[in-house]
Amino acid sequence: MIEPPRGATRFARVRARLEAAQPSGGPAAALYEFALFGFKQGWACLFGALMLSMLIATHLFYPAEAPLARYDFLTLGAVAIQLAMLAFRLESLREAKVVLAFHIVGTAMELFKTAHGSWFYPEPSLLRIGGVPLFSGFMYAAVGSYIARVWRIFDFRFDHYPPRWATIALAVAIYLNFFTHHWLPDIRLLLFATTAIMFWRTPVWFTPFRTARSMPLLLGWFLVAMFIWGAENIGTFSRAWLYPVQRDGWQPVPLEKLGAWYLLMIISFVLVSLLHRPQPRFRGGPQ
């Protein structure tokens, strides 16, 4: 076992102990690897899971007559979670910088989209910019936090990863289309096709325990987008925000939003790739 460096996060130390285990072969080893995979995924989702828990808890139990608006409580709670994760070494400072970057990018999109009626925030608050309460940026930050963590935890490697300039150009085009489609033709079908052409030969290799596993990167993005769409249903059920079709009563988030989240996943992935440069499966060897 390789000991984690001094100053490593608390998770890195726990993970090192778990990976030092010597399960017997056969079903026991497979079960241990599956359990370790679940533990690592859960840790990578920690920030988002805490945010969702806070949305549900405040929806069910936050007193309507409280002097502090629920949205303001959520904002302060999100800041407290972030500070606590740093203080207790549950997250690295580098990962916190990723959270900040996603908060800025997400808030910019929120300001535009709410101004154009794509969704809205039904409750009052003081800690807001325009019609956007500040806790909303943390929801985007949760996605960035997850991708940055899971990339590092599972030691992502890639075969046939497209050139960096091409992935950045794709991410910029996707981001701009979220704005420009309100006036210009929506090119998301072209963006889906371009994504498929660029990444159809790209598997992502990840290591749950000691053996590297792989899946198509396009499939991995879809699975994460599905989980985010599910989380969005929880968010709208808790009335943290609402789509126009939910104004008169909650109903599931339209499936078309799954496509939007898929495209946002690509933006998020490319942003994180600026922090963790994509590495081939074999360093210095053939891909």
Image (spheres, rainbow, N blue to C red):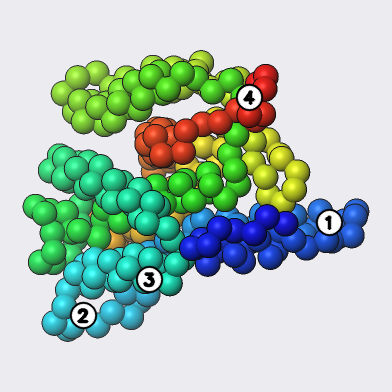
Identify which amino acid the numbered label 1 is placed on: Ala
Does label 2 or label 3 sit earlier along the sequence?
A: 2
Q: Which residue is mark 1?
A: 29
What residue is drawn where x is 16% and y is 78%?
Answer: 68
Could you say where residue 268 lies in the image, as x and y percent from the top left? 39, 39
Q: Which residue is mark 2?
A: 64
What's the CA distance linking mark 2 and mark 1?
A: 51 Å
Could you say where residue 203 lies in the image, as x and y percent from the top left? 62, 29
Does label 1 or label 3 sit earlier along the sequence?
A: 1
Q: Residues within 10 Å of mark 2 (few under 14, many from 20)?
A: few
What's the CA distance linking mark 2 and mark 3?
A: 32 Å
Mark linked to residue 87: 3
Q: Residues within 10 Å of mark 4 (few under 14, many from 20)?
A: few
What residue is drawn where x is 58% and y is 39%?
Answer: 156
What residue is drawn where x is 30% and y is 56%?
Answer: 138
Report the front residue among 53 and 277: 277
Report the front residue among 56 and 176: 176
Q: Secondary structure at mark 1?
A: helix
What residue is drawn where x is 19% and y is 43%?
Answer: 108
Q: As displayed, is residue 75 above or below residue 204? A: below
Identify which amino acid the numbered label 4 is placed on: Gly
Residue 25: image quadrant is: bottom right
